[in-house]
Amino acid sequence: MKLRAPLSKVRGLGSAKEGVHHWWAQRLTAIALVPLSLWFIVSLATMTGLDHQAVTQWMQSPIIAVLLILFIIALFYHVQLGVQVVIEDYVSCKVIRITSLVLLNFVVLFAGLASAIAVLKVFLGL
């Protein structure tokens, strides 16, 4: 029993074989973001009232720097995946959709790299 309609065979429509990867990546980043977000929120809550020097020393711990970079990677990748789905589903004009996807990738890449570099600069004491 085939689930594809005969018309879709003629038009060449059907699965692009990439949906499952995208779905799994979004779920895995969401699962990774749960403990990382909780850790980040608790860390921020416990640092209220601390000065810049104390927060800088906290960020210079190797474990903290690694956790922050993992949080940044998971967060920005998850955002990119989610916004990509919204653009693909709701933007009907092909030119605007492609332009939006390219712009999304550049913005997410730039913001993620800038965030990771900022953490590394603090970690290295630059």
Image (spheres, helix red, strand yellow):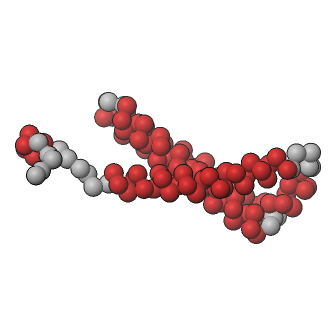
Q: Nearer the viewer, residue 59 or 38?
A: 38
The residue drawn where x is 79% and y is 53% is: 43
Q: Is residue 5 above or below residue 70?
A: above
User: Residue at 43% across / 42% down in the picture?
Assistant: 84
**Residue 122 or residue 4, whichever sits in front:** 4
Residue 72 percent location from the top left of the image: 63, 54
Seen from the viewer's position, the closer of residues 27 and 17 is: 27
Q: Give the quadrant of the C terminus.
A: bottom right
On screen, 6 above or below 118? above
Q: Does residue 93 appear to the left or right of 51 in the view shown?
A: left
Q: Position of residue 65 (x, y in %)?
A: 73, 63
- Callout count: 0
User: What residue is drawn where x is 8% and y is 40%?
Assistant: 7
User: In which image quadrant can residue 11 be found?
Assistant: top left
Residue with the most extreme front position: 1
Q: Is residue 112 visible?
A: no
Residue 123: percent from the left, percent from the top? 78, 64
Q: Is residue 49 left or right of residue 106?
A: right
For image coordinates 81% across by 64% down, the residue present is 60
Q: In the displayed structure, does residue 88 sit left or right of residue 58?
A: left
Work out which residue is located at the far bottom of the displayed protein and give it. Answer: 62
Q: Position of residue 53 (x, y in %)?
A: 91, 55
Horizontally, residue 16 falls left or right of residue 10, namely right
